[in-house]
Amino acid sequence: MAKTLDFQIKAINNTLGKLSKEMKKAKRDTELAAGRAMTKAIRAGTPKSNLKDRKTKEGRVLKSGDLKRSIGRITKLRRAIYTYIGVRSGSGNRNSGYYAKYLEYGKPKQAPKPFFKKAAASGVPIVRSILINGAKVGLKKYKIQNEK
């Protein structure tokens, strides 16, 4: 009787071990799909400059649409559990959106023109449905693989 119980416990542990691997893959794939949808929604709500290409005081060349192109998945975050979508800026980004904070919150002589929260809120229903469907698909795949 003890050997049978021990065998069943090992089988359950093996199954749970597989579940974590399958669900991690499903979670990652679903998060990437949801991130792409959120990026698309935020880019759609981001204003595009009507000015022509120009140079800043620092010597950077700003092109029309740089802010829109700078929105995306933020990588290089240490120990990040979640997928972060935002404005990528800094020396490593070609399309630097460093001026997004000025546009969102304003400057002393410039009124704020908030766009990010409104654009992100427009993408929430789509992202929510992608995440729910991704979880369902991941569980179905696991169930099909383990019925064999």
Image (cartoon, rainbow, N blue to C red):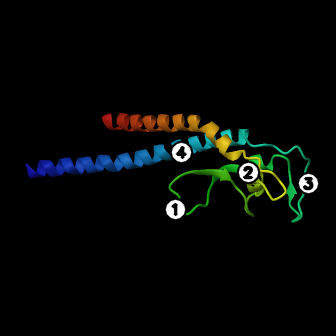
Residue at point 78%, 43% (across, down): 47
Does residue 148 appear anywhere in the picture?
A: no
The span from disc 3 to disc 4 (Cα, nearest Å) is: 37 Å
Residue at point 90%, 46% (across, down): 51
Task: From the image, state whether disc 1 or disc 3 is nearer to you.
Answer: 3
Residue at point 73%, 51% (across, down): 104
Tell me the amino acid under the disc marked 2.
Glu
Given the current orientation, which residue lies at the most extreme left position? Answer: 1
Q: Earlier in the sequence, mark 1 or mark 3?
A: 3
- Element type at mark 4: helix
Q: Indicate which disc residue 9 carries.
A: none
Residue that carries the numbered disc 4 in the rendered image:
31
Residue that carries the numbered disc 2 in the rendered image:
104
The span from disc 3 to disc 2 (Cα, nearest Å) is: 21 Å
The span from disc 1 to disc 3 (Cα, nearest Å) is: 38 Å
The span from disc 4 to disc 2 (Cα, nearest Å) is: 26 Å
Instruction: Count residues near mark 4 (Cα–Cα under 10 Å), then give few for <14, some for 14-19, many for 20+.
Output: some
Q: Are marks 1 and 4 in contact (CB under 8 Å)?
A: no
- Element type at mark 3: strand
Residue that carries the numbered disc 1 in the rendered image:
79
Tell me the amino acid under the disc marked 4.
Glu
Residue 87 drawn at (x, y percent)? 69, 53
Q: Are marks 1 and 2 in contact (CB under 8 Å)?
A: no
Q: Are marks 4 and 2 in contact (CB under 8 Å)?
A: no
Residue at point 27%, 50% (across, down): 13
The span from disc 1 to disc 4 (Cα, nearest Å) is: 16 Å
Q: Quadrant of the C terminus?
A: top left
How many numbered marks appear?
A: 4
Viewer-proximal residue among 113 and 35: 113
The span from disc 1 to disc 2 (Cα, nearest Å) is: 28 Å
Tell me the amino acid under the disc marked 3.
Arg
62 in relation to 45, above or below? below
